[in-house]
Amino acid sequence: MSLGVNGQPVEADVEPRLLLVHYLRDFLRLTGTQVGCDTTTCGACTILLDGMAVKSCGLFAVQAAGREITTVEGLAPHGHLNPVQEGFKECFALQCGFCTPGMVLASIALLTSNPDPTEDEIRWALSGNLCRCTGYANIVKAVQWAADKMRATASAPTGMGAILAANAALGSSQGSPSASSASSHGGHDGG
């Protein structure tokens, strides 16, 4: 089968009955995908399959043929954390860390489809991922933190967009009278 894993093409011969979670862990050595229950109950094995959060213990590896998989190992290229990973760090949203990769990936899937979720929407999206340590409060805060950061980053232009926006702002402020010059003339309208 051929598939993409964390942005890289992968070719493999696999047994038809091999679960995707075992393929990722045992063959590709992507051990951030946890094996928790093997019954799709705990969510520790959550990955992104074509951008959608799925539990990899409930799929055969061959079902991923021709598709794109993202595991937690694919989230921080060049050492730059994903905003959800940053949120988990900033909000102390982990203790033992066993559920964290699945929680992070489920959170990314949520924020991709809903960039401004309510607390209830976050709790619903993460309801298929069990944490036995934290009580979820800081996990919800972490997702809210990441959502805020992602919205702020998305609305702020970068690169050439930032240069063009700055030049446009500079040009408009130089070409029109400022509020301070209007007030220095006493604010009269000539009448």
Image (tube, grey):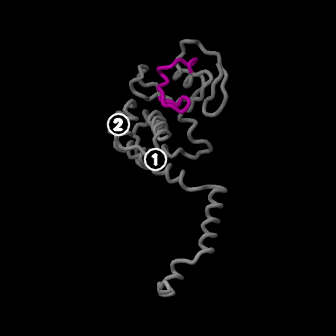
Q: How many marks?
A: 2
Question: For residue 13, which quarter of the picture?
Answer: top right
How much space separates mark 2 and mark 1, taking CA atoms? Answer: 23 Å
State which tag comes first along the sequence, 2 or 1: 2
Is residue 114 or residue 173 the one in the foreground? 173
Residue occupying image coordinates x 41% and y 43%: 117
Residue 49's label in the rendered image is none
Residue that appears at 50% across and 49% down: 150
Residue corresponding to mark 1 = 147
Residue extent of the magenta highlight: 46-63
Residue wearing tag 2: 133
Q: Position of residue 31 (x, y in %)?
A: 53, 29
Please state the horizontal and vertical placement of residue 162, each as a whole percent of the image.
62, 59
Q: Is residue 122 above or below residue 4?
A: below
Q: Quadrant of residue 51?
A: top right
* Local crowd size for mark 2, using a 10 Å CA cut-off: few (<14), some (14–19), many (≥20): few
